[in-house]
Image (cartoon, rainbow, N blue to C red):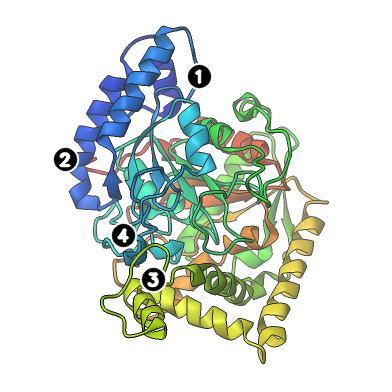
Amino acid sequence: MHQLTLAEIARGLADKKFSSEELTKVLLARIAQLDPQLNSFISLTEDLALQQAKAADARRANGESGALLGAPIAHKDLFCTQGIRTSCGSKMLDNFKAPYDATVVAKLAAAGAVTLGKTNMDEFAMGSANESSYYGAVKNPWNLEHVPGGSSGGSAAAVAARLLPAATGTDTGGSIRQPAALTNLTGLKPTYGRVSRWGMIAYASSLDQGGPLARTAEDCAILLQGMAGFDPNDSTSIDEPVPDYSASLNGSLQGLRIGVPKEYFSAGLDPRIADLVMASVEALKKLGAVVKEISLPNMQHAIPAYYVIAPAEASSNLSRFDGVRFGYRCADPKNLEDLYKRSRGEGFGPEVQRRIMVGAYALSAGYYDAYYLKAQKIRRLIKNDFMAAFNEVDIILGPTTPNPAWKLGAKNSDPVAAYLEDVYTITANLAGLPGLSMPAGFVDGLPVGVQLLAPYFQEGRLLNVAHQYQLNTDWHTRTPTGF
């Protein structure tokens, strides 16, 4: 049962081959047996899962149907879940139980999805390796000595190890697509505003976006269908109709115009990954796509712009964690200033403190114009580059990451080296575009992903291309040894 995709689970439940309760028990037992190797979960919700599974079975018995009805999933531990710890991977929120469900959690629960637990993540979603979590690093099931990527590394590792068929993640600079690439999954960052951020604990509000992680594009379409839609509680949510993502999967790629940016193939890209990217281009050409070289001239400025904007927004968002209202509080504070300083100093880990300091500096009176304002202008130039490119092509294709998964601890002493792993993903967040990573091969036994980018609200196009590619390749079917 653990090898079934979401789509296969939906068919199995509809055909009464097994019940949601049976499936849930199998997966909970599998998590208990295998997750100690991976550390992909922070909290398990066995009682809630079995309760939801029984309810889903009852709904099916009464004639209801739906692709997510009775399907087991997990949530990244920054989606608020009522009465359940929502830690954000931080000591700061280790004791926090949310008083309400995030919109994404509520929508998926209403669709009948079964929540198995909350997955591990980089602290406050800050990281590309899932090593900054207060609960310890997550390990990559393809090689337990390597990182799974971050910040949605817990969700990615759990799905890759077949502990469950799909999970939610969030993507601020590549935090769905990068771990998807490093663990042989399909991961989708929707258009900014397509999925509600209400109840999703914020890192950088103008960049954060929730999305699905699964083994196939077909499964991502199913999960995104349950997540997407307008939410009046979220002022950045966009009132745009949600198409049937599954209905567009089988469209022909004949005449599809694919752009390959020349800037992607720089000295920083592992040449073996470059070869796999070009092999995926050839596979899509055989399906009728037309390929041309394009240029994104301002891509070189993306990392410095992102690492001004994201920390600036983080320093503002994380000011609410002060030891007063909720979360960690230091022992025996001498006065209010001591309460603030020690609660924040003891509650936040080193990477979060680093980004708060960088962000506070960039927003300070003497440096706002020189750093933050300039970064926002660069952001606009990057968006303009994409708009010009999409006048010529339908999608943009390139590597998801410059390198395969690195060893645990290898980049801990050099944060900038870790930041550079986001070079291909962060532009989509700066421009608010949808992006998808799909499995495209292996280097030294470690998975490699190819990234697709599309114009606003064209998630269906990305899923269509990825699905057609997956019908003609088998990379996404490979399973890590031992799982």
Which residue is labeled 4 in the image?
94
In space, the residues marked 4 and 3 are separated at their CA atoms by 13 Å
Q: Which residue is at the far bottom?
A: 366
Q: Is residue 126 left or right of residue 236?
A: left
The mark that comes first in sequence, 2 or 4, is 2
Q: Residue at x 43, y 38 (%)?
A: 215
Q: Does 342 sit above or below residue 36?
A: below
> Looking at numbered disc 2 in the image, what kind of residue is underneath it?
Gln
> Looking at numbered disc 1 in the image, what kind of residue is underneath it?
Gly
- Label 3: few (<14), some or many (≥20) within 10 Å? some
Q: Quadrant of residue 463?
A: top right
**Residue 359 in view, yes or no:** yes
Q: Is residue 214 left or right of residue 148?
A: right
How many marks the image carries: the answer is 4
Which residue is labeled 3 in the image?
323
In space, the residues marked 2 and 1 are separated at their CA atoms by 30 Å
Which quarter shows the N terminus?
top left
Q: Quadrant of residue 399?
A: bottom right
In space, the residues marked 1 and 3 are separated at their CA atoms by 43 Å
The mark that comes first in sequence, 3 or 2, is 2
The mark that comes first in sequence, 4 or 3, is 4
- Mark 1 secondary-structure assignment: loop
Q: Which residue is at the far front?
A: 335
Q: Residue at x 59, y 65 (%)?
A: 265
Image coordinates for residue 356, horizontal then vertical, percent: 49, 77
- Label 2: few (<14), some or many (≥20) within 10 Å? few
The mark that comes first in sequence, 2 or 1, is 2
In space, the residues marked 3 and 2 are separated at their CA atoms by 37 Å
Image coordinates for residue 258, horizontal then vertical, percent: 70, 47
Which circle, 4 or 3, is nearer the viewer? 3
